[in-house]
Amino acid sequence: MRARLVVEDAIFQWELYHPGERMTYTRLAQEANIPLSTLNRMRRQVKRINLKKLDALAQVLDYEPADMLEFKD
């Protein structure tokens, strides 16, 4: 089973609670302290996702990690 990181909803929600601010993928990667290339790789279908990195992204966006994952066979 492959997983894919879906952050668009989390980013949208974050931007609602932070009017006038934008959360780009570059900013998200910087604030979560992960390389942008890793974030992009996590957004495609991968066999495994580093849970520490997923948790870091969830903390930045104030979102549940499980809500940012989509699973496919």
Image (cartoon, helix red, strand yellow):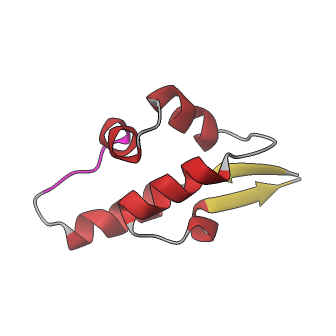
Can residue 7 be seen from the camera position used here?
A: no
Percent coordinates x, y for residue 48 in the rendering: 77, 44
On screen, residue 42 above or below 9: above
Residue 18 covered by magenta stretch: no
User: In the figure, residue 16 lies in which quadrant?
Assistant: bottom left
Q: Residue 18 appears at what percent x and percent y?
A: 18, 66
| Residue in view at x 54 percent, y 58 percent | 55
Residue drawn at the location 46% of the way across and 70% of the way down: 63
For the question of whether residue 8 can be seen, the reply is yes
Based on the picture, tell me whether residue 23 belongs to the magenta stretch.
yes
Q: Compared to 18, does 1 lie above or below?
A: above
- Taking depth in this image into account, of 29 and 3 the one nearest to the observer is 29
Q: Residue at x 52, y 26 (%)?
A: 37
Q: Residue furthest left?
A: 20
Q: Is residue 37 left or right of residue 71?
A: left
Single out the residue that lies furthest toward the top. Answer: 37
Q: Position of residue 58 (x, y in %)?
A: 48, 61
The answer to which quarter of the image holds residue 59 is bottom left
Q: Is residue 39 left or right of residue 42?
A: left
Relative height, residue 72 to residue 17 (above, below) = above
Q: Main secondary structure of the magenta part?
A: loop
Query: Residue at coordinates 52% horizontally, 38% vertically from top-left?
Result: 39
Residue 29 position, x and y percent, is: 40, 39
Q: Which residues are magenta?
A: 21-25
Q: How many labels, in total?
A: 0
Image position of 57 (left or right of 24): right
